[in-house]
C-alpha cells in the first residue's frame, strides 16, 4: 500500500514527530509514504511531493516546523473572513484527485486544525480515503483532550513570563503579555498559572479593566510593586470588541493588538508605568517539548493503524491518556473553550489570580 501525508494550516511544534510516526509505522507494514509539500497545494498537477523513507526522518523529532512545508492560503482554504466556511471548488478537487489516483494513494493523512480538517471532511464525503490528525497550538478542538504543539506553546509563554518577572520587579512596572489562542484561552490560562502571572484575561470570561486596576492598586498597597498580566489575543474588551488586524490576506480574520490596548488603559487607571509585549509566532516556533514529540509520534502511528483497518473519515483523538479516533464530522466546527466554572479557573482564583470578573 502507498499512503500520503500532508500538513495544512499554520505550523506547529510536533509536526515532524507525526511524520516520523507515520513513516515508521508504515515502513513496518511494508508500505510506502508519499509526503505532499505545502499542504493540499502539493496535490495539484503536476504534483509536488517526495518519497519518505525511515532514513529521511532520522533527527527530525527535535526540529520545529515541518519538513514538508505548510500553508493556510491557496486553493484549499476552508475558512474566509470571520470563520465562514468555503467549499473547495469541484474543478480543484478533481485535479487533486487525479494526482492521488495516478500515484495510487490508498490513504491520505491530513494533519491540520479545524479549517484543514473541514477541507478533509469535504474530500472524504466526495470519496477520498481521508484520515485526520488534529494540529493546533490553541488546544481548542472539542474531540480531543489535547493537541500536539500546545505544550510547546505554553512552555514559550512560561519562559517569556519568567523573563518579564525580573524586568517588572526591577522597574516596579505592570507588564502585559499578549499570547495566542484565538477564541480559546487555554494557552493564556495554562501559561499564566505556570508562569506566575497575577492577572489572566481570557476570551471566555468578560473582564473589567477597572477591576484589574483595583487589583493592581491593592497589590501595590501590600508592597507588591510589579504585576504580570497575561491576555489572550481573543479576549474581548469591556465593550465586547475583539481586536483584529485589518489585513487578513483573504483568509480567516487575524487577531491581535488587545495587549497594547489593555496596557494603555491600565496605565491610565493605576498611574503605574505599564508595558506590553506580544509573543506572537514565537509560540509556534522552535523545538517541540518531549510531550509534543511523544504525542505527535503516537498520533502518526494511530493514523497508520486506521489506514490499515480501512477506517477512513476519522480523526485521531487523545482522551484519558489513550490515543483512539472519532469521526471527523464530530471534530470540526466544535471549539473546546475554557469553562468559566471549570476546575482550572477555580484553581487560578484559589491561588489569588485575578481574571478581571
Image (spheres, rainbow, N blue to C red):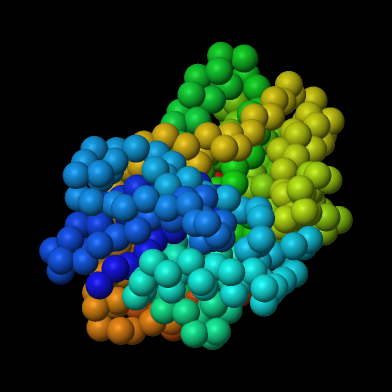
Residue 90 in sight here: yes
Q: State left or right for residue 67 relative to residue 353.
A: left
Q: Nearer the viewer, residue 156 or 220?
A: 156
Whether 274 is drawn above or below 82: the answer is: above
Quadrant showing the N terminus = bottom left
Residue 17 picture location, percent across and down: 31, 50
Q: Nearer the viewer, residue 18 or 182?
A: 18
Residue 96 picture location, percent across and down: 55, 68
Residue under the image location 35 percent in, 42 percent down:
288
Residue 8 in sight here: no
Residue 85 picture location, percent across and down: 71, 72
Residue 271 picture location, percent across and down: 79, 25
Residue under the image location 23 percent in, 51 percent down:
53
Q: Nearer the viewer, residue 80 or 174?
A: 80
Q: State left or right for residue 335 relative to residue 299.
A: right
Residue under the image location 39 percent in, 61 percent down:
5
Amino acid at each position: 500500500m502507498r499512503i500520503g501525508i500532508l500538513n495544512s494550516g499554520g505550523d506547529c511544534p510536533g509536526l515532524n514527530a507525526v511524520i516520523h510516526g507515520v513513516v515508521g509505522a508504515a515502513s513496518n507494514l511494508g508500505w510506502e509514504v508519499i509526503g505532499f509539500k505545502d499542504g493540499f497545494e502539493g496535490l495539484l498537477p503536476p504534483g509536488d511531493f517526495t518519497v519518505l523513507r525511515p532514513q529521511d526522518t532520522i533527527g527530525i523529532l527535535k526540529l520545529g516546523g515541518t519538513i514538508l512545508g505548510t500553508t493556510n492560503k491557496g486553493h484549499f482554504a476552508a475558512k474566509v473572513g470571520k470563520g465562514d466556511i468555503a467549499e473547495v471548488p469541484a474543478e480543484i478537487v478533481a485535479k487533486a484527485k487525479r494526482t492521488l489516483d495516478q500515484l495510487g494513494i490508498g490513504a491520505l493523512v491530513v494533519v491540520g486544525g479545524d479549517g484543514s480538517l473541514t477541507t478533509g471532511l469535504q474530500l472524504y464525503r466526495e470519496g477520498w480515503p481521508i484520515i485526520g490528525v488534529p494540529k493546533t497550538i490553541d488546544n481548542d478542538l472539542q474531540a480531543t483532550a489535547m493537541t500536539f504543539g500546545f505544550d510547546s506553546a505554553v512552555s514559550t509563554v512560561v519562559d517569556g513570563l519568567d523573563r518579564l518577572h525580573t524586568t517588572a520587579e526591577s522597574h516596579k512596572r505592570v507588564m502585559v503579555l499578549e499570547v495566542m489562542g484565538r477564541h480559546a484561552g487555554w494557552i493564556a490560562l495554562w501559561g499564566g498559572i505556570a508562569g506566575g502571572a497575577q492577572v489572566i484575561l481570557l476570551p471566555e470570561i468578560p473582564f473589567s479593566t477597572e477591576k484589574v486596576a483595583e487589583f493592581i492598586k491593592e497589590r501595590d498597597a501590600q508592597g507588591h510593586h510589579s504585576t504580570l498580566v497575561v491576555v489572550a489575543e481573543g479576549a474581548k474588551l469591556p465593550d465586547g470588541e475583539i481586536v483584529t488586524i485589518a489585513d487578513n490576506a483573504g483568509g480567516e480574520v487575524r487577531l491581535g493588538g488587545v495587549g497594547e490596548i489593555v496596557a494603555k488603559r491600565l496605565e491610565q487607571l493605576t498611574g503605574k508605568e505599564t508595558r506590553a509585549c506580544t509573543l506572537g509566532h514565537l509560540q509556534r516556533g522552535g523545538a517541540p517539548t518531549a510531550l509534543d514529540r511523544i504525542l505527535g509520534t503516537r498520533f502518526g502511528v494511530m493514523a497508520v493503524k486506521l489506514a490499515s483497518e480501512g477506517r477512513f473519515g476519522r480523526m485521531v483523538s487523545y482522551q484519558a491518556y489513550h490515543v483512539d479516533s472519532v469521526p471527523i464530522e464530530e471534530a470540526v466546527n466544535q471549539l473546546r473553550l475554557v469553562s468559566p466554572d471549570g476546575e482550572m479557573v477555580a484553581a487560578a482564583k484559589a491561588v489569588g489570580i485575578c481574571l478581571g470578573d
